[in-house]
Image: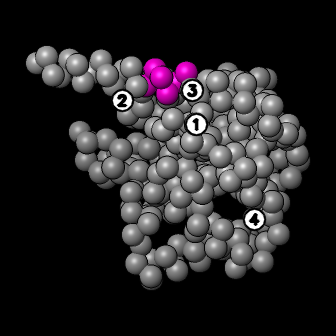
Amino acid sequence: MLTKITSQILGKLSNTLQFIEVEILFDWILPKKSQTLTVTEKSTLVFAPHQDDETLGCGGLIALKRELGVPVKVAFLTDGHKSYLHIKPEDIVQVRKQEAQEALNILGVAASDVYFIDQPDGELKQLSHEQKLHTINQLIQLLQSFQPEEVYVPHHKDQHPDHEATYDLVKDALSKSGIKAQLFQYQVWLFWGRPVLFQIDLQKLGQSYILPIKSVIEKKRQAIQVYRSQHHIFPRTFIKRFFKSKEIYFQS
């Protein structure tokens, strides 16, 4: 019992220290090294590995673009079925799709502009050669039909296999599609789970941008809260940083 309590205390302490480090990085270090990202009227396609990554990583950007009337589409690569142990996989898949459409509706994206690729959650890096080619072809078709001018993907070092695989798959599809879109990387797990102040090399991560989202932060907050099936997964200190009035993007 004492061991369990000690472990819980150490876990909470670790989360608190990580939160403090990320606060310093977001509020002091990155703003001094970043350019301000201006929201353009360029059509936008957001790729997310799981239902909620799009809102956490770039919910503010989506809301700002939709308020300007800019076309925005969102594509989810996995079915999200591994996110809840106490619900049948087929049931959680439907729950997460409903949550995604509700969250994106708050951000201004119609259900007809939301796409589900439905690859197995947690397995994007283990796709067979045939599955990989099929997925890339699906992404190419989406890119070519929409012709986006900007594409957003998780960072290539986002510390989650599905996130990093999403970057690789989209980068490959973009190259083969012939679409000349700007590629931006958003972050979800990038600055979590390691001593960021001493190990992060911003130059290797790419050119960083800060996007002010103060005018739409309430929309983003509401959209995040829609993902009720995910509330049990994240430490409170992890989620708190996505309620900031800025988002961070990279170009490499």
Disc 2 marks which amino acid?
A: His
In three-dimensional space, the C-alpha distance between marks 1 and 4, rounded to whole angstroms, equals: 41 Å
Secondary element at image label 2: loop
User: For mark 3, does the 10 Å Cα neighbourhood hold few (<14), some (14 to 19), or many (20 or more) residues?
Assistant: some
The numbered mark, 1 or 3, whose residue comes first in the sequence reads: 3
The chief SS type of the magenta part is helix
Quadrant into which the C terminus falls: bottom right
In three-dimensional space, the C-alpha distance between marks 3 and 4, rounded to whole angstroms, equals: 39 Å
Q: Quickly name the residue at label 3.
A: 21
Secondary element at image label 4: helix
The numbered mark, 2 or 4, whose residue comes first in the sequence reads: 4
Q: Quickly name the residue at label 2.
A: 232
Query: Left or right of 243: which side holds 43?
Result: right
User: For mark 4, does the 10 Å Cα neighbourhood hold few (<14), some (14 to 19), or many (20 or more) residues?
Assistant: some
Q: Which residues are magenta?
A: 15-20
Secondary element at image label 1: helix
Question: Badges 2 and 4: C-beta atoms under 8 Å apart?
Answer: no
Which of the labelled discs sits on residue 146, or is there none?
4
Query: Toward which corner of the image does residue 69 lie, by quadrant?
Result: top right
The numbered mark, 1 or 4, whose residue comes first in the sequence reads: 4
Query: Left or right of 57: which side holds 127?
Result: left
Q: Nearer the viewer, mark 2 or mark 3?
A: 3
Question: Badges 2 and 3: C-beta atoms under 8 Å apart?
Answer: no
Disc 1 marks which amino acid?
A: Phe
Q: Nearer the viewer, mark 3 or mark 4?
A: 3
Q: Nearer the viewer, mark 1 or mark 3?
A: 1
Secondary element at image label 3: helix
48 vs 141: above or below: above
Quadrant into which the N terminus falls: top left
Q: Residue at x 36, y 44 (%)?
A: 83
Disc 3 marks which amino acid?
A: Glu
